[in-house]
């Protein structure tokens, strides 16, 4: 009997310990792996080529930017800094003539890259930043007059580019890739758990409606949590700020309220989430942090 | 008590099952989490209803105050006041909540309502409420009493309250600008000190133009300004109190080209002047008039400005070969160059918030107004022209004012000099209307 009781006590302790300590780590692992194992390869391609984005990028920069990252000639780095990292260090103004010179070599790599398009996209997309590049969003936040110079320089350089790209002038690099890969819907599989692309859709919807107080001091260090209850039709039933210290920190409160307005804004709803997975998204936690937007 | 073995096994099995269910539940009901790290900076759509009043006069005040608030908020670039003609709810019974659904339809995210009352003692009572339309909650509700002539100031104070509540930052609408008003041909230019509200209203001249005046600077703690004027051929610095009109001479300073700037506590000024043929930086205690030399270098050190905590000084020096910006401790130690870009840098001014330094830059035959962090990183150029100069900070450190002058054409036209404000995003540049040419603006602190 003594052994039996000992075993029983030992097992009970073990169970309690597992229940107490084991669950959080199990939970994290599962959450972290779910999107990676199931989704990332297929979905990333889909997510990263939504038609609207392509339009935006077309408007903002008259050329496909990404292949340049790999094939960048020696003279590129400065330009690259401005395009891709403007949000981090906003750059010293390069004088316009220099910009022109640096831009000229670009058309060649672009033309060469076309046949390899899917590969290039696959390489780029796993970064999981399908929303407009830092430049696009950040340009709306902080401007330097360098940007104006660059744009005018680009518009000048754009003409020779068009001539060289004449065979397929109507489609941008990314549009061609998205055509080659097929439409979003064809690759969409509803039987999965909530996928990265579905999350990205919602993220994009909210991003469009979130206008954080950009000039606020230390804004980049603020993290706002909003707990959301959803309706089946994708509209928000209820949303609450889950932060403390709002009454004492006016900046934090302003940031939190801006996030709450983004969530409650009916013009940005319903969120594009699959009804059959309602159980998974009937409550959500939305975490807002403008760090990336304000340059890390 | 003896517990049969089979009971023990059942008990353990049951516990295992419970644990399994608990873990499963945790895993499958784990809350969906979405990180949002990007936003789209857009002005906040705000509906500002005309402040209501019982009498015709009160209604008139209400309309005027609403107009000023609307204009203040719009000029900040952070708000988009909606056209009143689009409003669905025109009147609201007193003591009731707004019909938020009506405001949501026109996409108003905030709502401002107010009431004007002329009370028995002749004062004006201005009451306002700010509502969050989506959350359906009151964000702010305040009332002010003032002489009716002060209605414009009250409107600015209400704008500041709204700005602060929504952005978390102090406003800057209840402030004034002192600047140098210029008129006449370039060879015989008449320069007068002038003052106006930050929106260009209530314009007045402070000096008569008999002597040349330059570079007014506001105290960050009071309504005092310093400015430079010439007494004979010698530059002389005056301190002038705008409220009282009291003026006194701070001293004669040889070789001075910019008026002294105040320290953040308003007790000291910092200046550069030529002693022994070389320009160095000094501080002066305003009460004792004792000067203290800060730099001692063969190069030209000029245009100093204190950090808001008073621990550091930013200044301009050619000690590295060209005119660049340097930071040092307030006692002159640890001098460190912070500007490394092409071109020459001048007139650095430390932001009242402490996080940025504004400067003028000259490169490629053009002038720029820019900002950089105190460690020299993050340089951004906000404005550019044939001549842009003299940046001055709004008291909240989010907006700069400067003057811009175009090139004078051969026929003598052009070359006009005007004041502009620009916010830190660089997107919201606005001209401040002045009756004549304008230069050297100085932004006041919030009026007490």
Image (spheres, coloured by chain):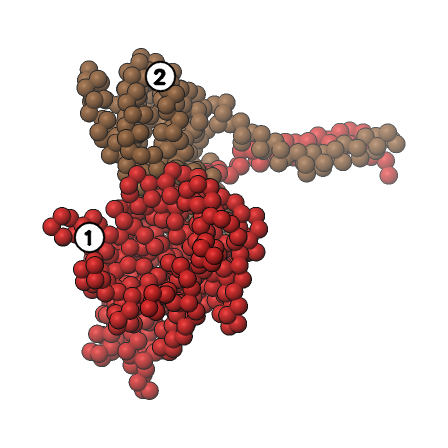
Chain colours: A brown, B red
Q: Residue B87: where, in percent of width, then height?
A: 22, 59
Residue found at x 33% / y 44%: B362
Q: Which residue is mark 1?
A: B415
Residue B119: numbered disc: none
Badge 1 density bin: few <14, some 14–19, many ≥20, Cα 10 Å: some
Residue drawn at (47%, 23%), measured in percent from left and top?
A: A38
* B299 up-or-down from A28: above or below: below
Is the Cβ of the residue at disc 2 closer than 8 Å to that at disc 1? no
Residue tagged 2: A118
Give the x, y percent position of residue B6.
78, 29
State which chain disc 1 sits on. Answer: B
Q: Is residue B231 left or right of residue B411?
A: right
**Disc 2 vs disc 1: which is toward the camera?**
1
The residue sitting at the bottom extreme is B121
Left or right: where does residue A130 sit relative to residue B375? Answer: left
Is residue B240 placed above or below B373 in the rendered structure? below
Does residue A153 appear in the picture of this structure? yes
Q: Nearer the viewer, residue B140 or A89?
A: A89
Element type at marker 1? loop
The quadrant of the rendering that contains the C terminus of chain B is bottom left
Residue A48: quadrant of the picture:
top left
Q: Chain of mark 2?
A: A
Q: Is residue B74 visible?
A: no
């Amino acid at each position: 009997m003594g052994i039996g009781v000992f075993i029983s006590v030992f097992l009970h302790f073990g169970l309690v310990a597992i229940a107490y300590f084991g669950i959080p780590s199990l939970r994290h692992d599962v959450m972290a792996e779910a999107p990676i194992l199931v989704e990332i390869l297929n979905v990333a391609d889909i997510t990263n080529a939504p038609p609207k984005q392509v339009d935006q990028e077309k408007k903002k920069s008259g050329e496909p930017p990404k292949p340049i990252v790999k094939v960048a000639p020696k003279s590129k780095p400065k330009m690259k800094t401005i395009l891709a990292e403007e949000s981090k260090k906003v750059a010293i103004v390069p004088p316009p003539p220099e910009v022109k010179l640096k831009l000229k070599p670009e058309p060649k790599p672009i033309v060469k890259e076309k046949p390899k398009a899917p590969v290039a996209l696959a390489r780029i997309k796993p970064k999981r930043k399908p929303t407009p590049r830092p430049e696009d969003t950040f340009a709306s936040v902080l401007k330097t007059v360098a940007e104006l110079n660059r744009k005018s320089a680009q518009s000048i350089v754009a003409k020779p580019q068009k001539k060289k790209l004449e065979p397929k002038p109507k489609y941008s690099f990314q549009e061609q890739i998205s055509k080659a890969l097929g439409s979003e819907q064809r690759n969409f599989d509803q039987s999965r758990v909530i996928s990265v692309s579905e999350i990205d859709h919602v993220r994009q919807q909210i991003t469009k409606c979130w206008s954080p107080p950009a000039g606020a001091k230390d804004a980049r260090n603020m993290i706002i949590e909003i707990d959301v209850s959803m309706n089946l039709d994708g509209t928000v039933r209820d949303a609450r700020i889950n932060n403390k210290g709002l009454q004492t920190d006016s900046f934090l409160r302003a940031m939190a309220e801006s996030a709450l307005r983004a969530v409650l804004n009916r013009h940005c709803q319903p969120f594009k989430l699959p009804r059959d997975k309602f159980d998974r998204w009937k409550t959500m936690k939305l975490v807002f942090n403008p760090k990336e937007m304000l340059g890390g | 008590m003896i517990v049969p073995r089979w009971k023990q096994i059942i008990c353990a099995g049951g516990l295992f099952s419970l644990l399994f269910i608990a873990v499963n539940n945790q895993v499958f009901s784990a809350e969906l989490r979405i990180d949002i790290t990007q936003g789209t900076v857009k002005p906040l759509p705000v509906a500002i209803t005309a402040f209501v009043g019982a009498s015709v006069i009160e209604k008139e005040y209400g309309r005027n105050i609403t107009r000023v608030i609307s204009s203040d908020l719009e000029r900040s670039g952070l708000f988009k006041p909606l056209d009143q003609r689009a409003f669905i709810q025109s009147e609201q019974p007193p003591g009731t909540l707004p019909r938020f659904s009506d405001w949501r339809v026109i996409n108003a995210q905030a709502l401002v309502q107010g009431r004007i009352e002329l009370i028995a003692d002749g004062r004006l009572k201005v009451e306002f409420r700010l509502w969050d339309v989506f959350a359906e909650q009151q964000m702010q509700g305040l009332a002010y009493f003032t002489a009716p002539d002060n209605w414009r100031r009250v409107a600015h104070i209400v704008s500041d309250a709204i700005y602060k509540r929504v952005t978390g930052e102090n406003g800057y609408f209840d402030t004034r600008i002192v600047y140098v008003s210029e008129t006449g041909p370039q060879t015989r230019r008449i320069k007068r000190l002038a003052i106006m509200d930050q929106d260009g209203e209530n314009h007045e001249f402070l000096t008569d133009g008999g002597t040349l005046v330059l570079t007014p600077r506001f105290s960050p703690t009071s309504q005092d300004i310093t400015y430079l004027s010439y007494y004979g051929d010698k530059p002389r610095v005056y301190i002038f109190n705008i409220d009282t009109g009291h003026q006194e001479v701070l001293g004669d300073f040889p070789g001075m080209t910019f008026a002294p700037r105040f320290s953040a506590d308003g007790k000291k000024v910092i200046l550069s002047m030529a002693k022994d043929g070389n320009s160095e930086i000094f501080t002066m205690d305003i009460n004792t008039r004792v000067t203290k030399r800060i730099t001692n270098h063969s190069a030209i050190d000029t245009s100093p400005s204190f950090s808001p905590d008073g621990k550091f000084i930013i200044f301009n020096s050619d000690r590295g070969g060209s005119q660049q910006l340097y930071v040092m401790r307030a006692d002159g130690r640890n001098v460190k160059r912070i500007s490394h870009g092409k071109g020459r840098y001048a007139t650095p001014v430390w932001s009242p918030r402490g996080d940025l330094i504004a400067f003028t830059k000259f490169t490629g035959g053009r002038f720029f107004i820019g900002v950089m962090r105190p460690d020299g990183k993050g340089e951004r150029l906000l404005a550019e022209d044939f001549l842009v100069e003299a940046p001055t900070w709004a008291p909240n450190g989010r907006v700069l004012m400067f003057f811009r002058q175009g090139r004078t054409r051969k026929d003598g036209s052009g070359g006009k000099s005007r004041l502009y404000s620009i916010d830190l995003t660089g997107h919201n540049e606005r001209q401040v209307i002045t009756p004549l040419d304008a230069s050297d603006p100085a932004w006041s602190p919030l009026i007490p």
